Amino acid sequence: MGLVIALNKGRILKECLPLLAQCDVVPEEDVYESRRLIFKTKACDHTLIICRSADVLTYVENGVADVGVTGKDTILEHGGSMGFYELLDLGIGKCRMMTAGPVGVPEPDGVLRVATKFVNISRDYYRRQSRQVSLIKLSGAMEIAPVLGLADTIVDIVDTGNTLKANGLEARETICDITTRLIANRASMKTQFDAIRQFSGQLRTVV
Ligand code: AMP
């Protein structure tokens, strides 16, 4: 039986589609041309769902998708789950979760104001550092928070560092390295064992 595969749209999708193609999993239509979000595949009976990172976890946890492809940042931010297994590091979407602040401005001594989309990762990191922080949840564009005086520091994903630089920020501490992972629904691991093993085995050989 075919698998339902949830894919993280954006940067990860771009790097993931060539890997899938090497496993003969190719969407019937061009995902960038079509407005569809669910795609049949050409040579196999898998179905692809294209959605936002956190929704990949939701679809996989709820068994709507058997497997999913998303970033380790999303998995860490989500916290532990009984609903899915992490099967494979795909080695794509490489970046780092980092703290960053305005160039040349030292962090204040008192409570640190931290703007981030990743509040759980940040809370955990600063707790381990025994650093008292006030977390400010943003949905994106964290880089402007220190510029506008909303926060002293941000916690965000850094790849080339160009976005930080363009906004007058510098990278400081690395919290963790991030790559893209293959995850599988726990129940599907039983009911779709052969198909998941075959799919993850194919992916393992191409990564
Ligand atoms: P850069 O300017 O290359 O350091 O890229 C940083 C920006 O791109 C940040 O706003 C990130 O949210 C985003 N980004 C970079 N790499 C990834 C990735 N692997 N997954 C998701 N977002 C990323």
Image: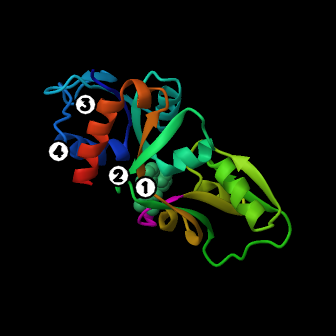
The image quadrant of residue 23 is: top left
- Residue 171 vertical position relative to residue 18 in the rendered view, above or below: below
Res 148 visible? no
Frontmost of labels 3 and 2 is: 2
User: SS class of the residue under badge 2?
Assistant: loop
User: SS class of the residue under badge 3?
Assistant: loop
Q: Which residue is mark 3?
A: 31
Q: CA distance from mark 3 to mark 4?
A: 17 Å
**Circle 1: residue type:** Thr
Q: CA distance from mark 1 to mark 4?
A: 19 Å
Quarter of the figure that contains the C terminus: bottom left
Mark 1 within 8 Å of ligand 1, using the beta carbon: yes
Question: Going from the N terminus, do you reach mark 1 or mark 2 first?
Answer: 2
User: Looking at the image, which residue is at 56% across and 70% down?
Assistant: 171
Q: Which residue is mark 1?
A: 179
**Circle 2: residue type:** Leu
Q: CA distance from mark 1 to mark 2?
A: 7 Å
User: SS class of the residue under badge 4?
Assistant: helix
Tell me residue 32's x, y (percent): 25, 33
Q: Which residue is mark 2?
A: 90
Q: Which residue is mark 4?
A: 22
The image quadrant of residue 17 is: top left
Question: Going from the N terminus, do you reach mark 2 or mark 4 first?
Answer: 4
Q: Nearer the viewer, residue 3 or 158?
A: 3
Q: Residues within 10 Å of mark 3 (few under 14, many from 20)?
A: some
Residue bounds of the magenta highlight: 157-162
Question: Going from the N terminus, do you reach mark 3 or mark 4 first?
Answer: 4
Q: Residues within 10 Å of mark 4 (few under 14, many from 20)?
A: some
Question: Going from the N terminus, do you reach mark 3 or mark 2 first?
Answer: 3
Q: Nearer the viewer, residue 136 or 177?
A: 177
Whether residues under marks 1 and 2 lie with C-beta atoms below 8 angstroms apart, the answer is yes
Q: Residues within 10 Å of mark 2 (few under 14, many from 20)?
A: many
